[in-house]
Amino acid sequence: MDEYLVHNVQLIDSPALLVYPERIADNIKTMLDMVDGDADKLIPHVKTHKMAEVAKMQVEAGITKFKCATIAEAEMLADTGARHVLISYQLTGPKLHRFCELVQAYNWVEWASLVDNLASAEELAREFEKTVHKPVIYIDVNLGMNRTGHVVDDELEALYRQLKADDRLDLRGFHGYDGHIRDADVALRQIHADAAIKPLEVLADKLEQEGQPRPVMIVGGTPTFSNHAHRPNVWCSPGTCLLWDWGYGALLTEQHFQWAALLLTRVVSKPAPGVVTTDLGHKAVAAENPLAKRVKFLNLTGYEITGQSEEHLVLQVENWDALQVGDVLYGVPYHICPTVALHDEAQVILNGETTGRWAIEARRRRITY
């Protein structure tokens, strides 16, 4: 806990998101160490942190390829030195025009997006016909999560061949996110990750044996990063590990990342014996999980979360007499990604002092385009 304490905490209003740049730097190093220092093997996702300063730290470490989920995140990356940006989403509706504008505005970035069917690919191609740019695409593959993507079957091969032959498009390969594979046992997780990607590898082998360039394969996220890090011929796209959280820290014990973002909250009331209330409501910490999986306090023991509303978090505590209104608590979110998206800015903590603020610019749906 001492490593996270803020000595000038009186300068920070609550609730607040705290970020620790030195720990972020350590997590970037750990990410690189897991791929034996080969930055070209990484295409990390930025949907967790959404901060230009964190992206710049990755670029300075030699990482130039990134994944993102929104056009705002893509624009943020273009402004921070990224050279290859994949929007890992199948774009439709107004997003297609916004993406087209972004590509033309930042023409030094190699942009890419996902498709999983011919109609969407056609829509993308038509949008870009009025420009000098040929859209780079990856086929989104359903590896078993059943959220997006085309299943691995004979029709996937036919889709690949048809898109590869379309001169309006620049098909590079496949994208497969296996976020449903979350076994606590890393060996069991390896078995499931291997089985999910095997049919895709077979297809890539077949295409390569025909004399075609081997399709690029972008696979996994943070949960299976350990399982894909040393797999040949793939790019890995971890994201949560940049900030880390309680949920993944408890599940992925073989990954040695550090908590680099905490929540700061204060006791605002002692409404009844044994009960204290803090200002950490739904609007400050991700609330999609049960109450017991919202936040873990580092400087409080003997407590149970009993209720939460928009602006309040209610706790049953053992040391009620020792706690006072105004006391500061430090908590690790169970799920950091949607937690960050609830905050406009993060307090930067260096050497135990708050030294400034980083805007969480890409939490917005639109920056310029």
Image (cartoon, rainbow, N blue to C red):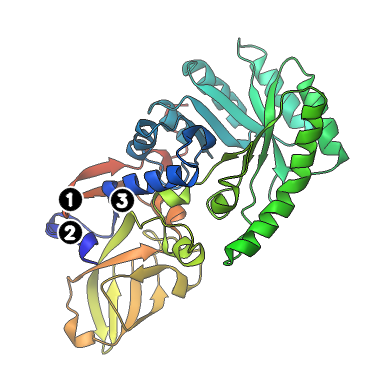
The residue where tag 1 is placed is 354
Which callout, 2 or 1, points at the residue further toward the start of the chain? Answer: 2
State the CA–CA distance, disc 3 to disc 2.
15 Å
Is disc 3 surrounded by few (<14), some (14 to 19) or many (20+) residues within 10 Å? Answer: some
| 317 over 32 or under it: above or below | below
Occupied quadrant, residue 9: bottom left
Which callout, 1 or 3, points at the residue further toward the start of the chain? Answer: 3
Q: State left or right for residue 335 relative to residue 303.
A: right
Q: Nearer the viewer, mark 1 or mark 3?
A: 3
Circle 2 — which element?
loop
Q: Residue furthest top?
A: 132
Residue at 49% across / 40% down in the picture?
Answer: 44
Q: In the depicted view, which residue is nearer to us: 38 or 7?
A: 38
**Quadrant of the image containing the N terminus:** bottom left
State the CA–CA distance, disc 2 to disc 1.
7 Å
Amino acid, disc 3: Arg
Amino acid, disc 2: Val
The residue where tag 2 is placed is 6
Pointers 2 and 1 in contact (CB under 8 A)? yes
Residue 274 location (% of width, % of height): 28, 88
Residue 241 location (% of width, % of height): 44, 51
The residue where tag 3 is placed is 23
Amino acid, disc 1: Thr
Q: In the depicted view, which residue is nearer to us: 232 or 178?
A: 232
